[in-house]
Amino acid sequence: MPSLGVPAWRVAVKAALKKNGKSACAKFAQLATVRASTGAPAVRTVVFRGFGDAFRDDDDDDARDDGDEANALTFCADARSEKIRDIAGDARGEIAWYFPETREQFRVTGTLACATSETAAKDARGEARRRNLWRKMRRGARGQFMWPAPGETRAEVGEGGRDPHDVDEDDARLDDETVGEHFALVALRADRIDHLSLRKNERVMHEIVDGTWTSTRVNP
């Protein structure tokens, strides 16, 4: 497959991130998946961690030519969460990402892939990117992956007891080399982006056609 290079939509996303840098919610996006249990839609907020090429190994020459992975929007998740089970059953996904300062929205449609401790043995590249994302996380943020499984009934903590959500940031399990067992990297490999600028009353559709990104202005 030919390299797709740096597409126009990625340039637009990076510009939006820069212009909205003072907004605390600029990196929050809404990710939709298909529920594994019912087939109904499921939506939740995730934090954009960077594009895929930010987490590759410097000596990974193959990754330099893989635009599909390099341009993937990357998030992290608890491997025990529902979203990971959803993706295992149906890899289709879409995010809606709104930037308040510039009043623009990106709807990104594509295929989701997960790198977890369970996929490490058969996916060396994915494991390398998972490890590199872990290293970029604050120790405090790493600690949430040591919590009890998400969605389960929260245990009552008696007087003098320790809440299992209180993780010591000096815990050796939070160091750079010990990637959390439940830490997962989630990547959305885009094939269609709908970019709407409310301020400019402009809308552009970005799609892959015959291995090349195309951009078409459409009515808002």
Image (cartoon, rainbow, N blue to C red):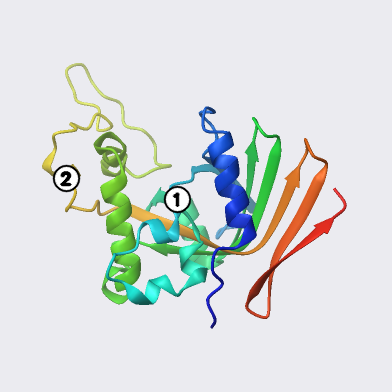
Q: Position of residue 2 (x, y in %)?
A: 54, 81
Q: Position of residue 109 (x, y in %)?
A: 64, 60
SS state under label 1: strand
- Which numbered tag is attached to residue 175? 2
The image quadrant of residue 184 is bottom left
Q: CA distance from mark 1 to mark 2?
A: 21 Å
Question: Foreground residue, 94 or 1?
Answer: 1
Q: Position of residue 60 (x, y in %)?
A: 31, 72
Q: Amino acid at mark 1?
A: Gly
In this rendering, position of residue 173 left or right of residue 165 = left
The residue indicated by pointer 1 is 50
Specify the quadrant that holds the N terminus: bottom right
Q: Earlier in the sequence, mark 1 or mark 2?
A: 1
Q: Position of residue 94 (x, y in %)?
A: 62, 55
Q: Is residue 34 visible?
A: no
Residue at the (29%, 72%) spot, across then down:
124
Position above or below: 210 against 133: below
Other residues around mark 1 within 10 Å, as few (<14) / some (14–19) / many (≥20): some
- Which numbered tag is attached to residue 37? none
Name the front one of labels 1 and 2.
1
In this rendering, position of residue 152 left or right of residue 199 = left
SS state under label 2: loop
Residue at the (18%, 23%) spot, across then down:
161
Residue at the (75%, 46%) spot, across then down:
196
Q: Disc 1 vs disc 2: Cβ atoms closer than 8 Å?
A: no
Quick one: which residue is furthest to the top in this view?
159
Other residues around mark 2 within 10 Å, as few (<14) / some (14–19) / many (≥20): some
Q: How many numbered dots are placed on residues in this image? A: 2
Position above or below: 145 against 4: above
The image quadrant of residue 194 is bottom right
Question: Foreground residue, 12 or 107?
Answer: 12
Q: Amino acid at mark 2?
A: Asp
